[in-house]
Every structure is written in C-alpha cells, then in structure tokens.
Image (cartoon, rainbow, N blue to C red):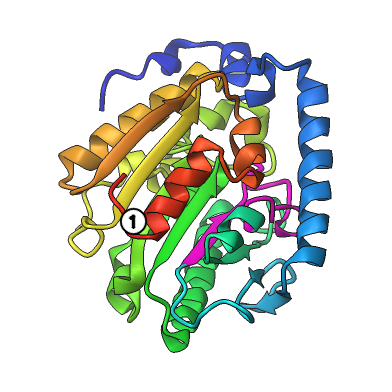
Amino acid sequence: MEPEEWSSWDKQRLEDEYSPSKWSRRGPADWVLDHHVKLVTRVSTYVKHEVSCQLDIPYGVREGEKFDIFGAEELPKDAPVFVYIHGGYWQALDRSISAYSVAPQHKAGHVVAIIGYELAPKVNLKEITLEIQLAVSAILKWAAERGSRSVVIAGHSAGSHLAAMLLHDSEWQNKEPHLNLLHGMIHISGVFDVVPLIETTMNLPLNLDSETAKSLSPLRCFSQSMDKVRNVKQLLVVGENDPPEFKRQTLTYAQAQMRAGFTDVHCKVMDTLDHFDIVEKLQEEEFVLTRLIIQLLSCAQL
C-alpha cells in the first residue's frame, strides 16, 4: 500500500474526512442526513405497497438477521437476483428503509433481496461480517433452488465493506456450494480500510483496535487465495462530492483488485453526487448507476 497520509492527521481531520454528510453541496450536514432518512423511508414504504414482497425472512437467530425479498412471486424463476446491503457505519439505518432500488430493478425483471444485520454495539464488526456470510449463503441457496441465472451483490458505504469482505474469506468461499451464481459486485462509496476510523467517533460503538481493524479491512487482506472470486465482475463507484478519503479508498481498492488478478474491474467517479444521493437516485429508472446495475444483472458488458 502507498504511504498512509491520514496517519499524520489530527483527530478532527480524520473525523471530517470520514463524515460524508459534511461534504455534500446540497445543504448542511444535519439536513443531508435528515433528508436521506426521510426520503429512503418514504420510498421504501411506497415500494412495499407496489411490489409483491416477502418480509422478515430469518437467516439466523438474532433479531436483525433477516432479509426481505421483492418480486419473486410474479417474476420468472430464472430471474437474476439483486442483493443490497445498506450502510450506516455498521451502527445505524436498517433494511426496512433500504428498498429504494427495488422499483426500477423489478421493472427490469430482477428479483431484489435487501439484507438486514445486527448493529454495533450489540455485536462487533467481525460478527457482522459473519452475519453477511450467513445471509448471502441463504440467498444463494434460495436463488439456486429457484433456478436463478445469476446473483449480483451491492453494498453502500459500510454495506460495501461487508460485501467486499466476502471476497477475502477463502474459508467461506470454499464451503459455499452456490458461489458460481455470484456474477458481480457493486461497491458504492465504500469503506475498504477501517484502520483510519480507530481515532474517530465512528469507532465508539465498534471498539476496534489496530490488529482487529487490519484483519477486517479488505484493502489489507489480499494475501489470501482469491482464485474462486477473481472472475466476479467488480464495479466501484464513488460520488464527486464524497469525502476525499472515500474517493481515495475506492480508487486504491480498485487498483488492488486489478493487481490481485481480478479480471473485470471498473471504477467510476459519479459527477455532482454525494455520499447519499448516489443511492437515493437508485429509485430512478434512468439514473446512470441504475442502468449500470441493470446491465450487470443482465450479464452485459459494462
């Protein structure tokens, strides 16, 4: 890895660099966060009335270990499955308000699964990564039994970190019988190195120390065998108005994937967008990222 410039920053600089709402040009940080929660709640509530759904499907024993499925009842059995993992720094937000991508994907003929997970400090970050493995395995099994052609996983922010961690766990990959269904992965404004978070307030519920943070950072875990996932298509996107650190991490992770031999890696900076409207706009059929997801699910070339 390149020299870590952030290691010389004071705590306030780190806090600012990892506070995405402060970098939006649409309004004050508090407004951006409030607007985001209200918008995704409204859209998710609407979708549940418009698209057939199976809610609160358990994949584990904890309260948060559930996922929701949209469109499975009316779409063909072989329809591709789009899996979405929400963000919130592993300590906020919820799958119940994360269905904003459903409508255009459903219209395109794709089933959508929204994964929930237990939040910190109720569980630690390692436990959350294991929850995601359980959830994805359950969805892959369901998709295989249904006859789905392919599965694509997307994550936003902390959700992108959780999706990426799947690429770095060879033990999970080796015991996952339906891994061949995983066609692509979309990382949206992701966090791929959690070590810089140690000295921020984001770490208060996580309580990460240096060694644990390193072991849970995709950027620091490329030494493991990745043969089983190198052909999984990778799309990394970040907003022009995301914090500089999010843009740096996205570019650095894309470069690391290419060096590690991933065969299809695309990295894009989305003009004018910030950390929040980059996913808020997934409700829009003509949004460029929506179209890219649809293409990937349809096995088209990006």
Residue occupying the point 68% across, 29% down? 201
Q: Is residue 92 magenta?
A: yes
Quarter that holds the N terminus: top left
Within the magenta stretch, is there residue 141? no
Closest to the observer, 269 or 50: 50
Q: Is residue 216 visible?
A: no
Instruction: Identify the residue shown where x is 46% and y is 79%.
Output: 143
Q: Residues within 10 Å of mark 1 (few under 14, many from 20)?
A: many
Is label 1 in a helix, a strand or a loop?
Answer: helix
For the view shown, which residue lies furthest in the bottom direction?
A: 145
| Residue type highlighted by circle 1 | Leu
Looking at the picture, tell me which residue is in the foreground, 48 or 253.
Answer: 48
Question: In the rendered view of the protein, which quadrant contains the C terminus?
Answer: top left
Closer-to-camera residue (111/198) = 111
Q: Which residues are magenta?
A: 81-102
Which residue corresponds to the image point at 49% horizontal and 40% vertical from the top-left?
289
Question: Relative to 292, is 133 above or below?
Answer: below
Q: Is residue 302 above or below residue 172?
A: above
Q: Count all numbered tags in the image, as a single digit.
A: 1
Counting from the top left corner in percent of width and height, residue 116 is at: 66, 62
Question: Measured along the vertical axis of the image, is residue 271 above or below residue 111?
Answer: above
- Residue designated by label 1: 167
- For residue 23, what is the image quadrant? top right
Name the spot of residue 19 as percent of width and height, x first.
Answer: 64, 24
Is 82 placed left or right of 53 in the picture?
left
The x and y percentages for residue 36 are 76, 35
